[in-house]
Image (cartoon, grey):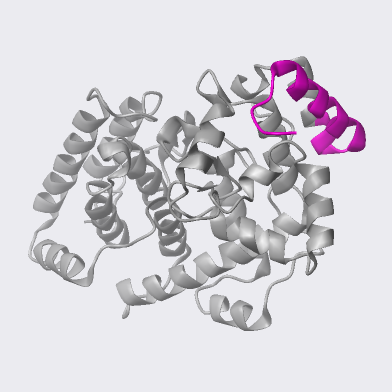
């Protein structure tokens, strides 16, 4: 059946797929979609296969040895994977979303998407994992009978995607969101065992890139869990890190500042965040910015920002102010995510962690 069929044909396809997968998490999701077209817009997380370790997931021993150099053993790798998925997919392996941010489709625990070209390699890797075209087509028919051919078409596997792919994906949107059938099929695909391995492999590649960047940015300093978490989130959301010349320039300025001036500079950074968050074209921070400003201001005033945090906050500022997605629409959110990791206190997507305890002696 071609993509973008009538509502009746989509409902029939959904019922068939649900019956095939009855009793599984995917089947439950599909039946929820069939009974409630607004399911994808629900404020609570839908049932999902949650990100975490599983016995069948493989990690290459050589990669494991390299990642151990920055404190990432198997348990920590999956803990970091879980941590990455929380702001991206509420802890789910799939959680597909549509074109709200001009990326056509974003899906998977790291929200790989067509727009940046990060999704296409995962789809190709999943197809190749079967080792036979017959097994691949059988799996695709079971998991994505309506939209599978579109998702894996040559037009959708190109970077950037071709117009035929874009038109097909946009036609599968209803009210600005992907329709329930595409939502369910992407969920089934990205919750399958084979795709969990593909996602794990992709995340391990990302972690190896993070390892190289951490060693570059902090060559003579201890590699702490905070630095690793900060670097992972930077790589996931923004892909690249500050350049050596920019890092050296900012660190040289900070090195000659006294404690009072450093606090003043941090407050200036906070003023930038506050003004940006309240501007007309910033999204994703409405529930967070006021609480963050109050708590982070308290941390600064009470001297609870140490040298490592000072450095990481300025590196965060370097990248946040150059976040260009949707013409800078997510700069305040970008800063919120990283600052929460750095300070151990913050609110992102309405989820608050930590609190400022005034009265601590100055760390600056």
Question: Is residue 160 shown above or below 204?
Answer: above
Residue visible at 46% across and 39% down in the picture: 354
Magenta part, dominant SS: helix
Q: Residue at x 44, y 54 (%)?
A: 233
How many callouts does the rendering have? 0
Vertical order, 56 against 236 (above or below): below
Name the image quarter holding residue 194: bottom right
Give the x, y percent position of residue 180.
68, 26
Question: Is 161 left, or right, of 180 in this rendering?
Answer: left
Give the left or right position of residue 41, taking residue 17 as reference.
left
Image quadrant occupied by the C terminus = bottom left
x, y percent for residue 268: 14, 41
Q: Which residues are magenta?
A: 1-28
Residue 228 in view, yes or no: yes
**Is residue 53 visible from the viewing direction of this image?**
no
* 19 to 51, vertically: above or below: above
Q: Is residue 24 magenta?
A: yes
49, 165: nearer the viewer: 165
Q: Nearest the camera: 194 or 284? A: 194
Does residue 123 appear left or right of residue 20 in this picture?
left
**Rendered location of residue 27, percent (x, y):** 84, 33
Q: Is residue 165 magenta?
A: no
The x and y percentages for residue 31 are 82, 24
Instruction: Identify the residue at horizontal 14%, vertical 55% (top origin).
Output: 259
Residue drawn at x 31%, y 71% is 217
Quadrant placement of the N terminus: top right
- Where on the picture, by quarter, is residue 33? top right
């Amino acid at each position: 059946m071609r993509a973008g069929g009538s509502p009746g044909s989509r409902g029939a396809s959904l019922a068939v797929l649900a019956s095939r997968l009855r009793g599984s998490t995917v089947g439950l999701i599909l039946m929820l979609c069939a009974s409630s077209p607004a399911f994808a817009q629900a404020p609570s997380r839908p049932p999902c296969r949650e990100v975490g370790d599983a016995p069948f997931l493989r990690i290459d021993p050589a990669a494991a040895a390299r990642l151990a150099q920055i404190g990432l053993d198997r348990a920590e790798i999956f803990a970091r994977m879980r941590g990455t998925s929380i702001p991206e997919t509420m802890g789910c392996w799939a959680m597909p979303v549509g074109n709200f941010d001009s990326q056509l489709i974003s899906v998977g625990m790291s929200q790989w998407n067509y727009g940046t070209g990060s999704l296409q390699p995962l789809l190709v890797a999943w197809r190749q994992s079967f080792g036979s075209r017959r097994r691949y087509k059988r799996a695709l028919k079971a998991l994505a009978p309506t939209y599978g051919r579109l998702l894996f078409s040559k037009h959708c596997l190109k970077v950037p995607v071709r117009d035929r792919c874009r038109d097909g994906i946009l036609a599968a949107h209803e009210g600005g969101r992907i329709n329930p059938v595409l939502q369910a099929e992407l969920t089934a695909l990205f919750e399958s065992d084979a795709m969990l391995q593909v996602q794990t492999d992709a995340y391990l590649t990302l972690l190896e890139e993070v390892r190289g960047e951490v060693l570059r940015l902090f060559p003579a300093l201890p590699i702490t869990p905070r630095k690793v978490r900060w670097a992972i989130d930077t790589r996931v959301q923004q892909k690249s890190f500050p350049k050596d010349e920019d890092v050296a320039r900012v660190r040289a300025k900070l090195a000659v500042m006294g404690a009072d001036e450093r606090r003043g500079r941090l407050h200036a950074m906070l003023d930038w965040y506050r003004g940006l968050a309240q501007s007309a074209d910033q999204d994703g921070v409405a529930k967070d910015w006021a609480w963050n400003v109050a708590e982070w201001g308290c941390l600064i005033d009470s001297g609870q920002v140490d040298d490592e945090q000072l450095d990481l906050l300025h590196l965060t500022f370097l990248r946040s102010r150059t976040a260009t997605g949707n013409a800078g629409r997510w700069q305040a959110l970008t800063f919120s995510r990283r600052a929460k990791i750095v300070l151990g206190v913050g609110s992102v997507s309405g989820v608050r962690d930590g609190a400022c305890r005034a009265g601590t002696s100055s760390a600056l």
